[in-house]
Image (cartoon, helix red, strand yellow):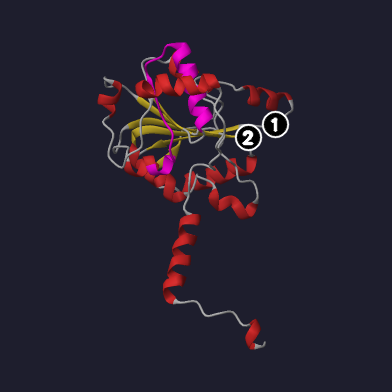
C-alpha cells in the first residue's frame, strides 16, 4: 500500500472520544424517538392537562404519595403509544395509581386528551426515556406492577441487542418493584417472546407467575387493542408473560 492510501494515525484523545460515542450508541434505551406533529386537540391537551398530570424529568427521586395525594398500589407502563389502553385501565381501576412513560409527544398529547375526557385523576404521564426514569426517579420498591406491552421487537437478529428486555434492565426494574410485584410483558413477535422468556428465566429474584406452560392468558385488566383484534382475525399470536419479584 502506498503512503497516499494509508489511513492517518488516530490520536489517543480522538480514539477515546470515538469509544465514548460508541458506548453512548450502544446504551439500551426504551424507545426509538419519533417526533411528530400534534393535532390541535393534542396541543390543547398538553397545554391544559400537562400541569395537572404531567411529570417533568429530573434526576431526583419522586415522592409518589405527594404526586397522587394518596397512598395506593402503583402501576407503571413503559411506552403507552397513544394512551387509549392506559386511560381505559386507569378508568376501570380507580383504586390504583397509574404512571405512563412515552417519548412520542403526540402520544402523550392523545393520552392526556383521553384522560381529560374520561375525567380520571389516578394517572400521571412522563415524556422521557424510561431507562433514565428508572435509574434516577423511581424509589426502591415503589411499584406493584410494571407493564411493557408490544415494545419495538427489533426483529432483525443484528438488532436484538437493542431490545429493552435485557438482563441489566430487568435487574434494575426488579429493585423498583415491591416483593410480590409483577413485571407484565406482551408481544406479538414470537421470537421476542422467546427472548423475553429466556432473559426472565435467567434473571435472579423473579419467578414465572404461570404454573402451566411458559406464557399467560391475557389478563382481564389488559385491554384488547384494535391492532390485536385485527391480528387475531389474521391468525397472529400474542404472548403475555408475567414474572413476580420474589426477593
Judging from the image, what secondary structure is the residue with disc 1 in?
loop
Query: Residue 47: percent from the left, percent from the top?
Result: 42, 22
Question: Is residue 121 magenta-colored?
Answer: yes
Judging from the image, what secondary structure is the residue with disc 2 in?
loop
Query: Residue 150: percent from the left, percent from the top?
Result: 57, 34
Question: Is residue 210 magenta-colored?
Answer: no
Task: Give the prevailing secondary structure in the magenta stretch.
Answer: helix
What residue occupies the far bottom of the structure in this picture? Answer: 2
| Image quadrant in which you'd find residue 228 | top right
Q: Which of 187 and 135 is in front in this view?
A: 135
Report the disc number at residue 141.
none
Query: Residue 109: percent from the left, percent from the top?
Result: 49, 25
The residue sitting at 32% across, 37% down in the picture is 138
First to last magenta residue range: 105-132
Position of 159 relative to 209 (above/below): below
Contact (Cβ within 8 Å) of mark 1 with mark 2 = yes
Q: Which of 80 and 72 is in front in this view?
A: 80
Q: Is residue 211 left or right of residue 204?
A: right
Query: Residue 38: percent from the left, percent from the top?
Result: 54, 27
- Residue bearing the label numbered 2: 188
Amino acid at each position: 500500500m502506498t503512503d497516499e492510501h494509508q489511513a492517518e494515525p488516530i490520536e489517543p484523545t480522538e480514539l477515546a472520544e470515538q469509544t465514548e460515542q460508541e458506548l453512548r450508541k450502544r446504551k439500551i434505551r426504551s424507545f426509538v424517538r419519533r417526533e411528530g406533529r400534534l393535532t390541535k386537540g393534542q396541543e390543547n391537551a398538553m397545554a391544559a392537562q400537562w400541569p395537572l398530570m404531567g411529570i417533568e424529568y429530573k434526576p431526583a427521586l419522586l415522592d409518589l404519595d405527594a404526586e397522587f395525594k394518596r397512598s395506593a398500589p402503583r402501576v407503571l407502563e413503559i411506552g403507552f403509544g397513544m394512551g387509549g389502553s392506559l386511560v381505559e385501565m386507569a378508568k376501570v381501576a380507580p383504586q390504583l395509581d397509574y404512571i405512563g412513560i412515552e417519548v412520542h409527544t403526540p402520544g402523550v398529547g392523545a393520552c392526556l386528551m383521553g384522560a381529560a375526557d374520561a375525567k380520571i385523576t389516578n394517572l400521571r404521564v412522563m415524556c422521557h426515556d424510561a431507562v433514565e426514569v428508572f435509574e434516577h426517579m423511581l424509589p426502591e420498591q415503589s411499584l406493584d406492577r410494571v407493564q411493557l406491552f408490544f415494545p419495538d421487537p427489533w426483529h432483525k437478529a443484528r438488532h436484538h441487542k437493542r431490545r429493552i428486555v435485557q438482563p441489566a434492565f430487568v435487574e434494575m426494574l426488579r429493585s423498583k418493584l415491591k416483593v410480590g410485584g409483577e413485571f407484565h410483558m406482551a408481544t406479538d413477535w414470537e421470537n421476542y417472546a422467546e427472548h423475553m422468556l429466556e432473559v426472565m428465566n435467567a434473571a435472579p429474584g423473579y419467578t414465572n407467575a404461570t404454573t402451566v406452560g411458559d406464557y399467560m392468558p391475557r389478563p382481564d385488566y389488559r385491554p384488547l387493542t384494535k391492532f390485536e383484534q385485527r391480528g387475531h382475525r389474521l391468525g397472529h399470536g400474542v404472548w403475555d408473560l408475567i414474572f413476580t419479584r420474589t426477593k
